Image: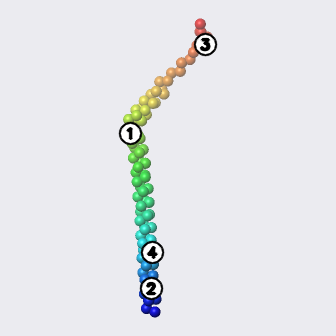
Amino acid sequence: MESIIQANIFFFISSVATLVLAILAAVFLVKLIRVIKKVEELADTLKESLTRLQPKNLLHSLFNSARRKRKVVVKKDVNNSV
């Protein structure tokens, strides 16, 4: 009879320990997922900022509008052909 009580106590303690470890693991995973999302957002923001700061993009954005304004359409004069 004493061995059955000891077995019940052992299984109760191991069940409580398993539940505690499962809860701690779940909390850890939730925190880890939040950190990973923040790191991804930071990486996206950094990538976007670096893309905007690249010299070729800066020069392209400055001079691209000037090129569009200076486009001249050359038309051939059909009536004065020799």
In the image, which is nearer the foreground, mark 4 or mark 3?
4
In the image, which is nearer the foreground, mark 4 or mark 2?
2
Tell me the distance, in whole angstroms, between the alpha carbons under discs 1 and 3: 48 Å
Sequence-first tag of 1 and 3: 1
Question: Dot 2 corresponds to which residue?
Answer: 7
Sequence-first tag of 1 and 4: 4
Tell me the distance, in whole angstroms, between the alpha carbons under discs 4 and 3: 90 Å
Sequence-first tag of 2 and 1: 2
Question: Dot 3 corresponds to which residue?
Answer: 78
Numbered circles on residues, count: 4
Tell me the distance, in whole angstroms, between the alpha carbons under discs 2 and 3: 106 Å
Tell me the distance, in whole angstroms, between the alpha carbons under discs 4 and 2: 18 Å
Question: Dot 4 corresponds to which residue?
Answer: 19
The residue shown at (45%, 67%) is: 26
Circles 2 and 3: CB atoms closer than 8 Å: no
As helix, strand or loop, the secondary structure at mark 1 comes to helix
Question: Dot 1 corresponds to which residue?
Answer: 53
> Looking at the picture, which amino acid does disc 2 mark?
Ala
Circles 2 and 1: CB atoms closer than 8 Å: no
> Looking at the picture, which amino acid does disc 4 mark?
Leu
The residue shown at (46%, 27%) is: 67
* Viewport quadrant of the C terminus: top right
The residue shown at (45%, 75%) is: 19
> Looking at the picture, which amino acid does disc 3 mark?
Val
> Label 3: few (<14), some or many (≥20) within 10 Å?
few
From the top left corner, tell me how far across and down residue 60 is, in percent.
43, 32
In the image, residue 32 sits, relative to residue 45, either above or below, namely below
In the image, which is nearer the foreground, mark 2 or mark 3?
2
- Toward the top, the furthest residue is 82
In the image, which is nearer the foreground, mark 1 or mark 4?
4
> Looking at the picture, which amino acid does disc 1 mark?
Leu
